[in-house]
Image: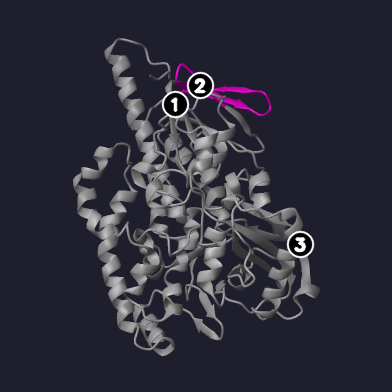
């Protein structure tokens, strides 16, 4: 549907220029809606935006793109071609996984990966092939569930859901599922650490999410030249090309509500923005606890929001380093006792003496992120969220020192401290205080069984009419591919609602002036 004249189109205000907010805004602007996006930060992308330290540039959050065809479809739906805005480079191998002296470098070439598995973990090559075959069948059933809303209990008895249920393994765990294919503990970790993308333990994460490692091995991982943040800058450009506006350094103070229906936004600068509809793409917990007047919400009161389960957090270290660094684009160094490390993060709420580390070295394939001959290094250590009794003001410096030590010695970077030209340490407190991430939970609401599909906050907001949710805090969940799907779902639901409202008004003989019911 194209609405024709923009002066007759409904006004849509979008809270937050994160991946979900921008994707929904792009789709709606392409449909002819009068779209304006309001972002508190100076740059777009939310927790996946660009960070600049001197002449070095970094992805603040997400560092690779999975399933790029979903993003291509998104741009096509907005009347654009992704390749006109973004250059993608496929990663081969996918990443470098370090278990002490053993290094596993899988790729999308299944024959090559199976051969490497047999060499490093004898007797597991056939298990890998069985896993890939079984997950292919599972993915065919699961993917449709990620592309549709779950807004009533009745959605569970629809044909596509009933067809998928036996394949979901939702009551099992990711670790248990992988144990059916691999007998080497290290290999199990190599196919379960992806639960980190959801901020969860593979010993607790529903078995549905074994598809994450399958998707990496089946579809590959891609690096956008300039960083993942370039995707969101491209989306902002497309929104502008369609007549929409993206306001940065322009925070929202309140979502305005009258008689149970949103009427727009109150900005932090005091300006009131009238809108027929609102898309909320900002962090779920922070929005529910900060952007509505007291007593407006019943289902999502501050107390109820606080009782929900949240993902872990991350301690981040961004470094501008003089000289080249001999590391893969992505590498993961597993703790010697990985189970204990994960339990300390997700159950015990303590910092690990032996922590796992993720290192991103994009300069090895992308010269745009650092000055010539230099490197932009990103290091991530999963840590408990702010529910844990950890004083980050006190322990932050020692955690930063530990990360530097691990990077220099475990990863083998010579003379690292002497080569550092720029440095920034980012703790769970910074995620909360600078980027409004509730509890510092980097990956949003947890993906336990009680917070999936119908039990996750709905795409059509249940509390106030005229509001739709996008992003990691709604269905289908966190991670860029699913966030993009949430944007498609919510944009479609808004459009369907708007079309029906317009038809009712026309049938009643009411002149359409952009107001909706």
Q: Residues within 10 Å of mark 2 (few under 14, many from 20)?
A: some
Q: CA distance from mark 3 to mark 2?
A: 44 Å
Q: Quadrant of residue 30?
A: top left
The residues colored magenta run 255-277
Q: Secondary structure at mark 2?
A: strand
- Residue depicted at 46% across the width and 79% down the height: 186
Viewer can see residue 82: yes
Q: CA distance from mark 2 to mark 1?
A: 8 Å
- Residue 52 at x, y percent in the picture: 70, 55
- Residue depicted at 34% across the width and 83% down the height: 125
Which label was assigned to residue 464? 1
Q: CA distance from mark 1 to mark 3?
A: 43 Å
- Residue 66 at x, y percent in the picture: 44, 61
Front label number (1 vs 3):
3
Q: Nearer the viewer, residue 460 or 304?
A: 304
Q: Quadrant of residue 148?
A: top left
**Vertical relation: 516 (above or below) 432:** above
Q: From the viewer's perspective, tell me whether residue 60 is left or right of residue 115.
A: right
Q: Secondary structure at mark 3?
A: helix
Give the mark nearest the N terminus, 3 or 2: 2
Q: From the viewer's perspective, tell me whether residue 408 is left or right of residue 330.
A: right
Quarter of the figure with the C terminus:
top left
* Residue with the mark numbered 3: 397
Residue 339 belongs to the span the image colors magenta: no
Count of numbered badges drawn on the protein: 3
């Amino acid at each position: 549907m194209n609405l024709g004249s923009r002066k007759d189109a409904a006004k849509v205000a979008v809270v937050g220029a994160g991946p979900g907010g921008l994707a929904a805004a792009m789709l709606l602007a392409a449909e002819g809606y009068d779209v304006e996006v309001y972002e508190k930060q100076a740059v777009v992308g939310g927790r996946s935006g660009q960070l600049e330290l001197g002449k070095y540039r970094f992805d603040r959050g997400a560092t690779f793109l999975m399933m790029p065809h979903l993003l291509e479809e998104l741009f096509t739906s907005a009347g654009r071609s992704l390749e006109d805005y973004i250059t993608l480079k496929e990663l081969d191998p996918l990443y470098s996984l370090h278990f002490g002296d053993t290094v596993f470098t899988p790729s999308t070439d299944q024959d090559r990966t199976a051969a490497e598995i047999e060499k490093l973990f004898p007797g597991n090559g056939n298990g890998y092939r069985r896993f890939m075959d079984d997950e292919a069948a599972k993915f065919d059933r699961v993917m449709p569930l990620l592309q549709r809303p779950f807004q009533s209990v009745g959605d569970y008895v629809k044909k596509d859901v009933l067809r998928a249920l036996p394949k979901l393994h939702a009551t099992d765990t990711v670790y248990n599922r992988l144990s059916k294919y691999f007998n080497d503990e290290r290999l199990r970790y190599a196919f379960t650490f992806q639960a980190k993308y959801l901020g969860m333990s593979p010993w607790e994460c529903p078995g549905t999410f074994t598809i994450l490692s399958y998707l990496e091995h089946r579809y590959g991982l891609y690096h956008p030249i300039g960083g993942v943040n370039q995707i969101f800058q491209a989306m902002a450009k497309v929104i502008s090309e369609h007549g929409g506006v993206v306001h940065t350094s322009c925070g929202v103070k309140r979502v305005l509500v009258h008689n149970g229906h949103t009427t727009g936004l109150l900005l932090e600068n005091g300006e009131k923005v009238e809108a027929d509809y609102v898309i909320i793409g900002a962090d779920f917990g922070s929005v529910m606890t900060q952007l509505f007047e007291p007593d407006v919400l019943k289902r999502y009161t501050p107390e109820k929001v606080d009782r929900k389960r949240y993902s872990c957090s991350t301690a981040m270290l961004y470094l501008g380093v003089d000289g080249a660094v001999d590391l893969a684009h992505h590498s993961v160094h597993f703790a010697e006792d990985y189970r204990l490390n994960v339990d300390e993060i997700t159950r015990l709420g303590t910092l690990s003496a032996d922590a796992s580390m993720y290192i991103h070295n994009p300069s090895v394939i992308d010269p745009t992120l650092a000055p010539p001959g230099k490197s932009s290094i990103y290091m991530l250590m999963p840590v408990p969220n702010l529910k844990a009794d950890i004083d980050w003001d006190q322990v932050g410096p020692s955690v930063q020192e530990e990360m530097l030590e691990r990077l220099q010695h475990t990863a083998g970077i010579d003379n690292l401290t002497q080569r550092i030209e720029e440095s920034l340490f980012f703790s769970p407190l910074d995620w909360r205080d600078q980027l409004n991430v509730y509890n510092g939970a980097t990956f949003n609401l947890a993906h336990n069984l009680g917070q999936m599909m119908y039990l996750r906050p709905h795409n059509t907001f249940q509390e106030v009419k005229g509001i739709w949710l996008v992003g990691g805090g709604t269905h289908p969940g966190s991670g860029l591919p699913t966030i993009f799907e949430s944007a498609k779902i919510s944009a479609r639901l808004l459009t369907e609602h708007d079309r029906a409202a317009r038809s009712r008004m026309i049938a009643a003989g009411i002149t359409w002036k952009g107001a909706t019911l």
